[in-house]
Image (cartoon, grey):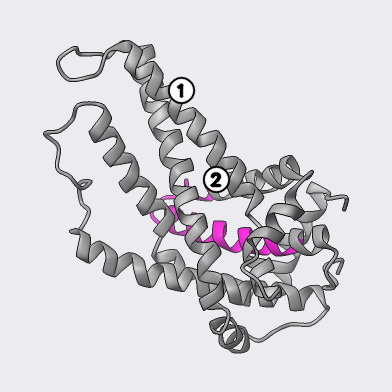
Amino acid sequence: MADLKITDVVEKTFKFVGRDPALIALFVLPALFPVNRIVSSYATYLVMRATLGLGELPSTPPSTPPAPLLAAYLVPGFFLGVWASAAGVLKVTELGNGGKLGLIEALYRGLRKIPRLLVPALVGLPLSTLMVSSLTTAVTYCSLLTRGELSEVVLPPVSSLVTLAAGSVGVFVVALYVLVRLRLSAPACVTENSFGLATSWKAVKGNWWKVLAIFLVFGAVSAAVGRIPVVGTYLSELLGDLLGITAATIIYFQLTGAKSGTEG
């Protein structure tokens, strides 16, 4: 089993981004379409509306466009995100080999990877949605219980809220576990002639906690950047995607032993 070092991966991730700032350019446009965040917020709203007896609220979150317009926004955003991920994997791979792939060439070659890469992307989206929405609802239920803000008319009884909170935590744990096991699907899919799901599942085995820790580090960095006034949310989205795909590619080559030269 490959020895995955957390500090080594984190250091190489920032090093690679510094060596090829064009990596950042790949995620500038996709960051304008925070698909995961929007879908997760939408799902959380619907769950809260259904479970907390808030039927008088509209069926869609406030300030959210109608479903047809929402789809018109999310579909191109999803496509751009997949395209940027494919091109990002190709650029990081070339950096690991000691070279530097041009931005246009990376986008051109990445475009041909999109059809296959859509599969792991479509698997990851609902998992991410389940993880975020279940955690949010669990925190909300626990907050209601601890603050005693219960109304027999509007909200379910305490026992129901406890059950809902426990169920949400369970869903979060399962979704998080599966999501981490499949976190290397994108680089595996781009590099191999497969969807990358099986490769990622096998590679992460025995390294689950380390892979989680690595992405928690980058999550903390993104969260800190997100506190910047005005542009923080956008920069957080951009940085999260950039560091995520770079780190995933580095981890993939280290754990699978594939030839890439990511020791550089």
The answer to whether one can see residue 27 in this image is no
Question: Residue 209: where, in percent of width, then height?
Answer: 73, 40
**What kind of secondary structure does the magenta stretch mostly adopt?**
helix
In the image, what residue type sits under mark 2? Ala
Q: Which is more toward the observer, 215 or 52?
A: 52
Q: Is residue 225 magenta?
A: yes
Residue 157, position in %: x, y? Answer: 27, 13
Is the residue 241 above or below the residue 103 in the image?
above
- 166 vs 243, nearest the viewer: 166
Mark 1 crowdedness (10 Å alpha carbons): few <14, some 14-19, many ≥20:
some
Which residue corresponds to mark 1?
166
In this rendering, is residue 103 above or below 166?
A: below
Q: State left or right for residue 56 relative to residue 123.
A: left
- Residue 13 placement (x, y as % from top left): 72, 61
Q: Quadrant of residue 155?
A: top left
Q: CA distance from mark 1 to mark 2?
A: 29 Å
**Magenta highlight range:** 223-250
Residue beneath the point at 67% across and 59% down: 198
Q: Nearer the viewer, residue 215 or 164?
A: 164
Q: Residue at x 58, y 48 (%)?
A: 179
Q: Residue 45, percent across and down?
A: 28, 40
Location of mark 2 (residue): 224
